[in-house]
Image (cartoon, helix red, strand yellow):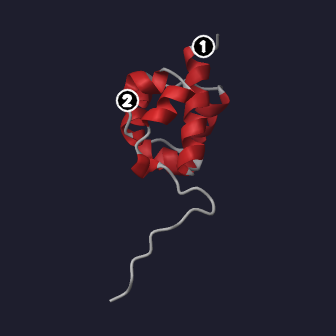
């Protein structure tokens, strides 16, 4: 069974893919630098409890679901946070 830290890294990676976020986007969203996100995702720095709180708020899911792993976090991600699927219909607002 992977460690909580490893599970969190996998979960964040999945959420980033699902929302089409880059490390810089996530960093701006939770108040860290892109380099800090890179180190945390590479496992050379650890996620703090404050980071976990900010991640949960950023993605709009409860902390417990964020820490429960990829499947639970992905199921709990609000639809408004998901990136449109490639080739899916895009909302078009008519001019005027």
Q: Position of residue 75 (x, y in %)?
A: 47, 34
Residue at horizontal 63 percent and vertical 59 percent from the top: 86
Relative depth, front residue between 38 and 85: 85
Relative depth, front residue between 20 and 9: 20
Choose the circle earlier in sequence order: 1 or 2.
Answer: 1
Residue at horizontal 51 percent and vertical 35 percent from the top: 74
- Horizontal arrangement in the rendering, residue 17 relative to residue 95 (left or right): right
Q: Secondary structure at mark 1?
A: loop
Within 10 angstroms of label 2, few (less than 14), some, or many (20 or more) residues? some
Residue at horizontal 47 percent and vertical 22 percent from the top: 67
Q: Position of residue 13 (x, y in %)?
A: 60, 37
What is the distance, in whole Å, between disc 1 and disc 2 at their CAs?
18 Å
Residue 54 sits in quarter: top left
Question: CB of mark 1 within 8 Å of CB of mark 2?
Answer: no
Q: Quadrant of the N terminus?
A: top right
Residue 34 sits in quarter: top right
Q: Position of residue 63 (x, y in %)?
A: 39, 25
Q: Which residue is mark 1?
A: 3
Residue at horizontal 60 percent and vertical 45 percent from the top: 17
Relative depth, front residue between 93 and 42: 93
Q: Quadrant of the C terminus?
A: bottom left
Relative depth, front residue between 11 and 85: 85
Q: Which residue is mark 2?
A: 53
Please say if 24 is above or below 4: below
Q: Secondary structure at mark 2?
A: helix
């Amino acid at each position: 069974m992977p460690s909580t830290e490893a599970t969190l890294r996998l979960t964040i990676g999945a959420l980033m893919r699902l929302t089409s976020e880059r490390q810089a986007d996530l960093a701006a969203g939770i108040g860290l630098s892109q380099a800090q996100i890179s180190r945390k995702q590479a496992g050379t720095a650890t996620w703090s409890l404050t980071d976990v709180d900010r991640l949960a708020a950023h993605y709009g899911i409860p902390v417990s679901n964020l820490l429960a792993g990829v499947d639970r976090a992905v199921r709990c991600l609000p639809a408004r946070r998901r990136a449109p699927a490639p080739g899916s219909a895009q909302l078009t607002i008519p001019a005027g």
